[in-house]
Amino acid sequence: MQAMNSEELLAFLAAVGHAQRIRIITELAGGPLYVSELARRLGVSRPLLYMHLERLEKAGLVIGRLELSDDGKALKYFELAPFDVQLNVDTILAAARLGGADAPPDGTGEAGKHSPKGTPQ
Amino acid sequence: MQAMNSEELLAFLAAVGHAQRIRIITELAGGPLYVSELARRLGVSRPLLYMHLERLEKAGLVIGRLELSDDGKALKYFELAPFDVQLNVDTILAAARLGGADAPPDGTGEAGKHSPKGTPQ
DNA sequence: TTCACCTGTCAGTCTCAACTTACACATGAA
DNA sequence: TTCATGTGTAAGTTGAGACTGACAGGTGAA
């Protein structure tokens, strides 16, 4: 979970930055749940929940596994993946330096320019 | 920057979770810049940049101030606000507990339920 | 007066994520 | 066979955010 590039960081932030998905995380914090049960608890349609879970899984926030219940039914369980991300200027800059989708094509982003008053150009 | 509720956390995450705004943060990390100059550096239209900056400001990530340059021109400078957010299951749960826009109407979200195999209902 | 800067905002278009409805397909139990 | 349960996906609609272009205003300098 350390040193993600800007692409991964973006996926992570976009995944967590949504009310429904925060609720999913909150619910899964109590332990693994299968999709239909989770949908019932949240009052959300199953296809919609699938989309959110897919997004969370791609971002590495949840892990899904197909499990066979005692009575032979296939249940898709999801559980929280451990994650811990520090978010400040330094970590964002570090991610940007690692490149990724949104990295500027040219290295025009040197730090330390500070020109709050001098005529810029 | 500590103990934000789910609403604030969501605003923060949604603000940072966007490629363009990550680039804005990256650029502002080098020091304050006024809008037109920033727009030029990023190759972004000014109205669009305004929207992003507005969003970042509402989330408390940047601070804008109108400044008068030496030759009497009004320049709108933006600079990074200090921020440091830890993102893991605990901090998200803590934010959810503080309530906010996405908080569930009923307190159905107690942790510690763990029913991965027992018949849920 | 005109030019080259700047701020600020409005009215659009467009794209994509979010969301709904509906289907096909399994299983075990009545 | 039918019902209630589950998975998985393929349509569609919709709504919000992202983005563009054009405007109105201000300044100082040529």
Image (cartoon, coloured by chain):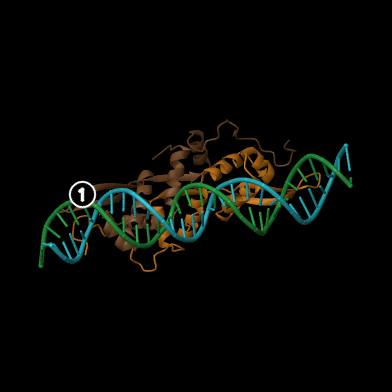
Chain colours: A brown, B orange, C green, D cyan
Q: Is residue D3 above or below residue B84?
A: below
Q: Residue at x 31, y 55 (%)?
A: A28
Percent of width and height locating residue A43: 34, 64
Graded by Cα atoms within 10 Å as few (under 14), some (14 to 19) or many (20 or more), the crowding at tag 1 reads some
Is A116 located above or below residue B107 in the figure? above
Q: Residue furthest top?
A: A107
Give the amino acid at mark 1: Glu
**Residue B13: x and y, percent?**
48, 51
* Residue occupied by mark 1: A67
Residue at the image position 69 percent from the left and 44 percent from the top? B36
**Left or right: B40, with A16 as reference point:** right
The structure residue drawn at horizontal position 65% and vertical position 47%, both measured from the top left corner, is B78
Which residue sits at x=35%, y=48%? A54
Q: Nearer the viewer, residue A78 or B113?
A: A78
Q: Can residue A116 be seen?
A: yes
Can residue B5 be seen?
A: no
- Residue B117 image point, x, y percent: 19, 55
Indicate left or right for A14 with D25 as reference. left
B22 horizontally vs B70: left or right: left
Q: Name the chain under label 1.
A: A
Q: Position of residue B38 (x, y in %)?
A: 65, 42
Quadrant of the image for the C terminus of chain B? bottom left
Q: For this rendering, which residue is in front, B52 or D20? A: D20
| Residue sitting nearer the eye, A54 or B101 | A54
